[in-house]
Image (cartoon, rainbow, N blue to C red):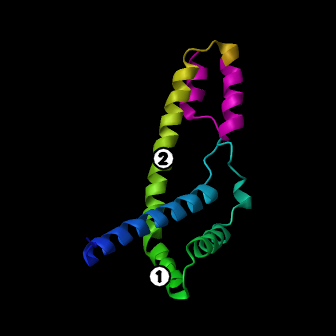
Amino acid sequence: MKPDRQTLHAGLGMASLVVIGVVLGVTLDRTVPLPGHAAARPTEALDPAAEHRAAMRDLVVELQLSDAQKARVEEIFSRHQASVHDAWQIARDRLSTAVDSATVEIAGILDPAQLERFHEWVEERHGSVPSGLHDLGRRR
C-alpha cells in the first residue's frame, strides 16, 4: 500500500525540521562556545556569517539541494533564527546558573587554602568566578 500525499508531506516536513535543527545546532555550537568548554574557541575568532555559509555549503553538498531548495532553506533559517537565538540564550542562562550553584556548593566544603586554589581553577576554566564564590571566601 502506497502512503498518501499527506503522509509523505508530513514525513518530509519532519525530515526538514530535523535537518534544520541539526544545521542550526551545529552552527550555534560552532559560534557560541560555552566558557570553559574544551572545544571553546576565542570569541574574536568567531564569524557567525562564515559559519552559516560553511553549514549551508555542507548542506547543499550533502543533500544535493537545487538552487530553489537552497533559497527556501535560507528563507527558513532566516524565519527561525530569532527563536533559535532566544532559546539558546535561555539555555545558556540556565546552564550558567546551574554551574554557579554547583561551584558555590563545592567551595563550601573546602578549607581556605583549597578555596583559594579553587578560585584560580574556576577562573582559568570559566573566565570568571561567580559572585557567590567570592562572597563565600570573604565569610571565612
What residue appears at the point 28 percent right and 73 percent down from the top-left corner? 2
User: Which one is earlier in the sequence, the residue at label 1 or at label 2?
Assistant: 1
Name the secondary structure under disc 1.
helix
- Tell which residue pokes out farthest to the top in this image: 111
Image coordinates of residue 126 in percent, x first then y, are: 65, 39
Q: Looking at the image, which residue is at 63% across and 67% down? A: 48
Q: Amino acid at mark 2?
A: Asp
The answer to whether residue 70 is above or below residue 131 is below
Viewer-nearest residue: 93 or 88? 88
Q: Which residue is mark 1?
A: 72
Looking at this view, name the residue that lies furthest to the front.
Answer: 1
What is the spatial separation of the Cα atoms under label 1 and label 2, in whole angstroms?
A: 32 Å
Please report the residue visible at 63 percent of the width from the left and 70 percent of the height from the top. 58
Q: Magenta span: helix, strand or loop, mainly?
A: helix
Disc 2, SS: helix
The one of 17 and 91 positioned closer to us in this rendering: 17
Q: Which residue is mark 2?
A: 93
Q: How many neighbours does mark 1 have within 10 angstroms: few (below 14), some (14-19), or many (20 or more)?
A: few
What's under tag 1, amino acid-wise? Arg
Q: Nearer the viewer, residue 12 or 118?
A: 12
Q: In screen coordinates, is 125 left or right of 6?
A: right
The percent coordinates of residue 139 (x first, y second) are: 56, 18
- The segment highlighted magenta reads 115-140
